[in-house]
Amino acid sequence: MATTTRRHFLIGAGAATVAAGVVAVRPGVHGAPHQAYFAHLNKVLKDAGIGTPTLVLDLDRVRANAQRISAHIGGRMALRLVNKSLPCLLLLDELSKQCGTNRQMVFSLPYLQLLTKERPHVNVLLGKPLPVAAAAAYYRERTANGFEPARQLQWLIDTPERLAQYRNLAHELRTPIQVNIEIDVGLHRGGVNSDDTLRHMAQQIKEEPLLRWAGLMGYDAHTEKVPALAGNRQRARDHAKARYKESLDVMLGSGLMIPIEPLTFNTGGSPTYRLHDGTGAANELAVGSAVVKPSDFDTPLLDDLLPAAFIATPVIKASDHFTAPYGAEWASQALQWWDPNQRASVFTYGGNWLAQPVSPEGLSNSGLIGKSSNQQILVGSGLQGLQPDDFVFFRPTQSEAVLQQFGDIAVLEQGRLSTRWPAFPAMA
Ligand SMILES: Cc1ncc(COP(=O)(O)O)c(C=O)c1O
């Protein structure tokens, strides 16, 4: 009898320990209604009669970010706006004016055509080498409007083979072509990675009067992805700068004719622009995404910038209970029991964007049910207090290829929707 009692006691104690353990690891409840910024935005969008997924651009934050970026660069280097990351002409106009630059980095034929047609005063550097067929199409399809490619456009060239193709194009067109050489400073995405190849390309340019050397481009975003262990990241940064300097020395020592126009030595990008102060070989920085700061750019170097672009989308259905489809209902019940943050659900108008829900706080994608571009389910504790027609706000993970998905951009200024700006067409 005494043994039985002891066994019962042990079993009971064991069960209590397991239960305590389960309680300890079970997720705590979290979530809250929209805080002031998004509560206001929710109201503004409703008052404006908006009922579709909308890209909201906070222009005050854009301006504040642009001011900080300009202040960091401090006039020590030129600034080139990254066109694909800010895909809206009026936004680019605004930034060009505020930052005092007419330089843009462009990555596709359609956007090159659009930009040079609409803004003939612009100065363009391609950010990736385009197939020569795309370059030929550019010259074939353009109409004269004051934009002078021979003076205002630098094609990016990554290999001697491509350089030969562009030389042939220049011959066919009987027009001078400016070429900027892409150098590999450690990213290994493309670009020239040997001094001999650079010398060879310098020679090709020397032999062809229609080819004009316009500068170098070395993109260094990889350095901030290198784990900062045992000095690795700093080594990658130093290596990138050293490779740039060596490449420049090779070019300057090649006997190439240096044009009267200042050469363009482009580097950086949002993740690394703060690492440059004009004392290195580069004289120009490309910056785009940092101006609107999507979540992929939440890095210590960009800490002082504010997110400025959000996707606002209406709630179609809000429910206190998350119920998985028939046949899997038991699974949602088990999940709700386990995680109080999966008790409630909302279905939004659209979804499956390159974006994360940010407001109201505590919503997440369902691990049980996949994403949907039509009506996306989000789960939460219910503390968000959402009703149909309320807005859920997502923060894009990147701005490139996302800002174009919602038609005209809703511009927020001083807490009011001041205007709508057409986004670029979604094209590659
Ligand atoms: C060559 C080059 N420079 C600069 C950038 C930086 O763009 P962002 O400032 O938007 O990160 C990119 C981005 O892809 C790039 O490919």
Image: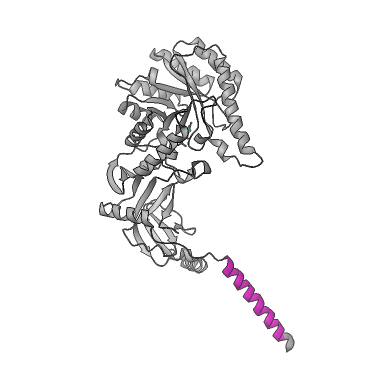
Q: Is residue 170 above or below residue 360?
A: above
Q: Is 15 placed above or below 45 here?
A: below
Is 235 inside the magenta-drawn segment?
A: no
Viewer-closest of 133 and 345: 345
What is the quadrant of residue 17 in the picture?
A: bottom right
Secondary structure predominantly adopted by residues drawn in magenta: helix
Give the magenta range.
4-30
Instruction: State yes or no: residue 5 in magenta.
Output: yes
Residue 400 in view in this figure: no
Quick check: can you spot residue 139?
yes
* Left or right: where 157 falls relative to 110: right
Residue under the point 44% across and 18% down: 178
x, y percent for residue 208 = 48, 11
Identify which residue is drawn at 46% across, 15% down.
212
Name the residue located 44 percent from the left edge and 39 percent from the top edge.
Answer: 290
Q: Is residue 179 left or right of residue 94?
A: right
Query: As displayed, is residue 417 above or below residue 236?
Result: below
Quadrant including the C terminus: top left
Residue closest to the eye, 76 or 203 = 76
> Looking at the picture, does residue 332 appear above or below residue 127?
below
In the figure, residue 175 lies in which quadrant? Answer: top left
**Residue furthest right in the image:** 3
Q: Position of residue 288 (x, y in %)?
A: 43, 36
Q: Which color scheme is applied?
A: one colour
- What residue is rendered at 34% in x and 32% in y? 97
Q: Position of residue 31 (x, y in %)?
A: 44, 62
Quadrant (top left/top right/bottom left/bottom right) for the N terminus? bottom right
